[in-house]
């Protein structure tokens, strides 16, 4: 009988199934938050700089004859509105409800938008790496250099190195976790696969993945699924209610993701505000940054294997 050898593994880095062990949430040791809290909500604001010399990362208007024109004024200006106007609308919501913010920011955006950086620093927001420009990490010429430049730009602005990373569009190469660990990162958000933090293996030391979201993310909802503005509120509340129930015996983490050019638009902002008007009243809910989630998990969660 012919026994065929299994196919050889492609010449790539660690596969996802090699980086993370399968784990059923119902079979884990319960995670406990301080003071009997049930769940954590963290809010991530993505601030990006779109290079006008490159194809736009996203488009709301396609040109009459198709293609990728340069300059793409309408789509570049659409994004720029968020940093000129939309961010400041959203900032009022953070101030009104005393929410700690996490700024996922391109390294190049540090110098491009100083008032945004200053506003985040004044409020002691966390800065999270988000690529040097808003570009697929698989298309970056030198990923390690891109991560290094982003890290240094944030360190210059914030006075300390970022601990967390979010890939532009959640993109990674086969080497991203290794490159992040080499640059001192302690957590990443690209692996949207759990309601609790989890450990990811690298070829050196492990890194924590903090729960992020594709469901309560304004890019997915408004630009890809083309929902009405009110969908953001409806889905956030439905998600919150279910996770709050799930967290009865073991803590959960819920993320809310927004972009100034999307959720900061005039017709959408009130739905963002109304989320916190409701869930701020719920007992047993902590509003934390990614750093706070990481530090809690390092103490309360399982040790890396």
Image (spheres, rainbow, N blue to C red):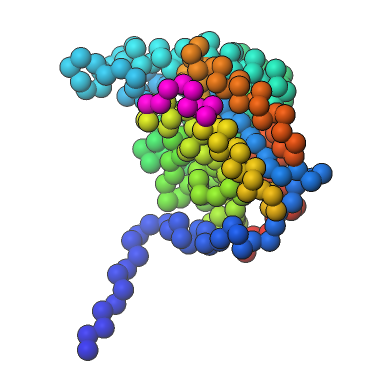
Give x and y (percent) for residue 200: 56, 55
Q: Which residue is drawn at 44% across and 35% down?
A: 169
Front-most of residues 105 and 198: 198
Does the magenta segment cover residue 221? Answer: no
Where is residue 212, by image quadrant? top right
Q: Across the whole image, how many numbered discs are drawn on residues?
A: 0
Span highlighted in magenta in the image = 226-234
Does the magenta segment cover residue 227? Answer: yes
Front-most of residues 105 and 160: 105
Give x and y (percent) for residue 66: 20, 20
Where is residue 274, by image quadrant? top right
Left/right of residue 255 with respect to residue 62 in the rendered view: right
Give x and y (percent) for residue 72: 31, 15
Q: In this view, does 266 lie above or below 204?
A: above
**Residue 103 shows in the view:** no
Give x and y (percent) for residue 243: 61, 43
Q: Residue at x 56, y 16 (%)?
A: 270
Q: Is residue 304 above or below residue 269?
A: below
């Amino acid at each position: 009988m012919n026994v065929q050898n299994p196919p050889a593994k492609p010449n790539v880095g660690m596969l996802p199934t090699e980086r993370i062990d399968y784990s059923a949430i119902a079979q884990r040791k319960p995670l406990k938050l301080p003071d009997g809290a049930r769940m954590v909500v963290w809010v991530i604001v993505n601030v990006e700089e779109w290079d006008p010399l490159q194809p736009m990362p996203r488009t709301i208007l396609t040109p009459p004859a198709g293609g990728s024109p340069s300059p793409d004024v309408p789509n570049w200006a659409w994004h720029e509105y968020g940093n000129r106007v939309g961010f400041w609308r959203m900032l009022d919501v953070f101030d009104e409800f005393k929410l700690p913010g996490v700024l996922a920011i391109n390294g190049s955006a540090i110098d491009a938008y100083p008032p945004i950086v200053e506003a985040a620093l004044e409020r002691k927001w966390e800065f999270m790496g988000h690529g040097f420009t808003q570009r697929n990490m698989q298309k970056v010429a030198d990923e390690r250099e891109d991560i290094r430049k982003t890290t240094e730009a944030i360190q210059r602005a914030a006075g300390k190195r970022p601990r967390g990373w979010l890939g532009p569009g959640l993109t990674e190469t086969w080497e991203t976790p290794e490159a992040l660990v080499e640059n001192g990162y302690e957590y990443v958000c690209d692996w949207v696969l759990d309601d609790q933090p989890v450990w990811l293996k690298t070829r050196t030391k492990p890194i924590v993945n903090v729960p992020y979201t594709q469901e309560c993310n304004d890019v997915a909802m408004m630009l890809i699924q083309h929902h009405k503005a009110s969908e953001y509120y409806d889905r956030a509340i439905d998600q919150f209610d279910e996770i709050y129930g799930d967290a009865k015996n073991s803590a959960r983490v819920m993320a809310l993701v927004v972009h100034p050019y999307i959720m900061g638009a005039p017709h959408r902002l009130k739905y963002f505000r109304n989320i916190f008007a409701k869930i701020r009243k719920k007992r047993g809910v902590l509003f934390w940054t990614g750093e706070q989630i990481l530090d809690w998990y390092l103490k309360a969660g399982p040790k890396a294997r």
